[in-house]
Amino acid sequence: MPTPHSPIGIFDSGVGGLSVLQALRHELPHEQFVYLADSGNAPYGDARGDAFVQERSLAIAQYLQQQHDIKILVIACNTATAAAVELMRERMPQLPVIGVEPAIKPASFSSQTHHVGVMATRGTVSSQRVARLVAEHGQRAEFHLQACDGLARAIEQSTEQALPEDASTTEIRALCTKYAGALGSFGHKTGQMDTLVLGCTHYVFVKDDLRALLGPDIQFLDTGAPVARQTRRMLEQRHLLGPETDGSLQLAQAEQIRLMTTGRLTAMQAAAQRWLDLPAACSQAVSVCSPSAVATPA
């Protein structure tokens, strides 16, 4: 059974969920974390169907529960949340599960022009979950949804390929330009979008590229910090919040944070170093089998 000392589990289709891990570390610095990137099957949102995403989500949840005795699970993937969070809660009622979803509700309240752009994967944009959010909050703002085919994959591949920085980011910048332009006009005039919702956790890592395109006055919203706060609340409610330690007892990073990938280990190590300043020792490659099987390290 999990205890306050048990780790928080996090998973994403790839490395994008490291942006959520970043927020969780800031909110809960004394907790232990195990993060699993299903990079061998990434990205979920461009071409994977709901049945595949549900199967992988259940398999990963089972792996993290059986192998690491996690006390709570954060789905750091909008596509997996939309496709699988309700099923996971039904199948694994003993495991608290927190999902992420595009910040449509807060955007509806904060937009001054009442026009909001939403960039997400095709799987998220076309999901019933997002349709319900837009319908629920559409009286306060008009939402302009844009499926960004290939952007999550390009961000994922930027850590996998040994390319010069300018070469590896050219495709990302081109895709950002394409999809931001497809959304329409940004600004603070009537009819313009003054807010952009980043509806994929990968996109947080290209926020600077998007800001360079849209200007410094456009509001960007993602779900990392709200999810971290919700995680804290759920742990407190269940009396599972990890004990604070003094500096002399602080765990080493390799003990506090374990990163796993079903893809290339070097890609995970590169992403962790680039975005979280974590050493290679934090990462390992794993194989996650079907929900009925037991996963073992690769």
Image (cartoon, helix red, strand yellow):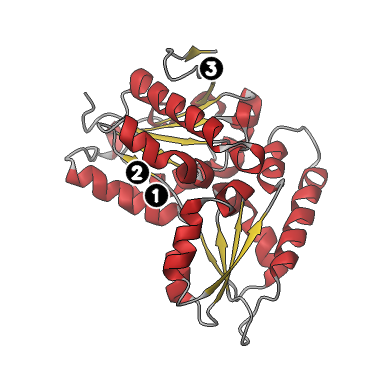
Point out residue 275 in the picture as x, y percentages from the top left corner: 57, 44
Classify mark 3: residues with Cα within 10 Å, few (<14), some (14-19) or many (20+).
some
Q: Which image quarter holds the N terminus?
A: top left
Looking at the image, residue 92 sits to the left or right of residue 220; the answer is left
Q: In the image, which disc is placed on residue 26? A: 1
The circle on residue 287 is: 3
Residue 115 lies in quadrant:
bottom right
Whichever of labels 2 and 3 marks the residue nearer the N terminus, that label is: 2
Among the 4 quarters of the image, the one containing residue 125: bottom right
Mark 2 in CB contact with mark 1 (< 8 angstroms): yes
Between marks 2 and 3 in the image, the one whose residue lies nearer the viewer = 3
Callouts 3 and 1 close, C-beta under 8 Å: no
Q: Report, in whole angstroms, how far the alpha carbon at label 3 lies from the one at label 1.
A: 29 Å
Q: As displayed, is residue 245 above or below residue 217?
A: above
Above or below residue 294? Residue 274 is below
Residue highlighted by disc 2: 29
